Amino acid sequence: MAGPSRIAAGHSTSLLDLYDDTLLYDLVHGPFASGEILQFFIDAAAEFGPSLLELACGTGNILIPLTKAGVDVFGLDISDRMLSACRRKAAEQNVAINVRKGDMRSFRVGRKFGLIYIAGNSFQHLYTGTDVSECLECVKIHLEAGGRLIVEIYNPYVPLLVREMGKRFVVGAFGDYVLTEDVNYDAALQLSEFHWHFWHRPSDREKTLSFMMRQFFPQEFESLFELHGFTMEQKFGDFDRSGFESSSASQIVIASLK
């Protein structure tokens, strides 16, 4: 397995194979957003829409229920398999969606949006400063005047980052699967290399899927928006709109262009 330095330098997707298994992905993340997450984006659409762009829309966990609720959402994702799953799930729900293959670092769709959002921690697949800059510059091109950008990422928890490398930890049970993980963290690059091990209890077989995530610490994360011409208007620690604090699991930012 290639180390973090090699992966980051080449923008390799060899450690993104979690997204090749859409069934296991949805098993862990849930097939459709609901509750506070869905309501957060419905409210954001009402406030900043009416047109939305979701970058890294994946299997449509958010996009499909938003569209079903009457919100105009356009989706982009770099993975053909994720997009195929998204289209299949939408068809099963009798929902007409508008999605297209695209890289959030280099997309052009020929229209502007009142709200662009990157949810599900997908922003953390921007491994380098160049990746981040390219993404945010593309966002600027596609935002309407007065539009907003919403980004959701994890809030790094240092005790988890410095766990013993190679040692497995239990994540939880999902249907017939028990999920454990081991994580290698490169502090110099702020990159975590995750290996998710899915043990299928009925067959006693195991499948391992891997992915990389960049860790953005709170002050660094906020500075990125300022650096690229955005003003951070609000920051939440959860989709219930509770204020961000040290113990928050997430960093959810609403930003506008200066």
Image: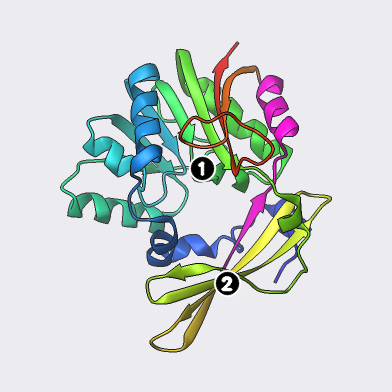
Q: Secondary structure at mark 1?
A: loop
Q: Is residue 214 magenta?
A: yes
Identify which residue is drawn at 58% across, 28% down: 243
Identify which residue is drawn at 26% across, 36% down: 67
Identify which residue is drawn at 65% across, 17% down: 229
Q: Which residue is mark 1?
A: 103
User: In the picture provided, is 120 more to the left or to the right than 128?
Assistant: left
What residue span does the magenta drawing correspond to? Answer: 209-228
Amino acid at pointer 2: Thr
Question: From the viewer's perspective, is residue 128 above or below residue 163?
Answer: above
Q: Is residue 112 magenta?
A: no
Residue 212: x and y in percent read 64, 57
The colour scheme used to paint the residues is rainbow
Question: From the viewer's perspective, is residue 133 above or below residue 77?
Answer: above
Residue 255: x and y in percent read 56, 21
Q: Residues within 10 Å of mark 2 (few under 14, many from 20)?
A: some
- Name the one closer to the observer, 243 or 115: 243
Residue at the outermost left position: 94
Does the image show residue 127?
A: yes
Q: Which mark is residue 180?
A: 2
Residue 188: x and y in percent read 84, 50
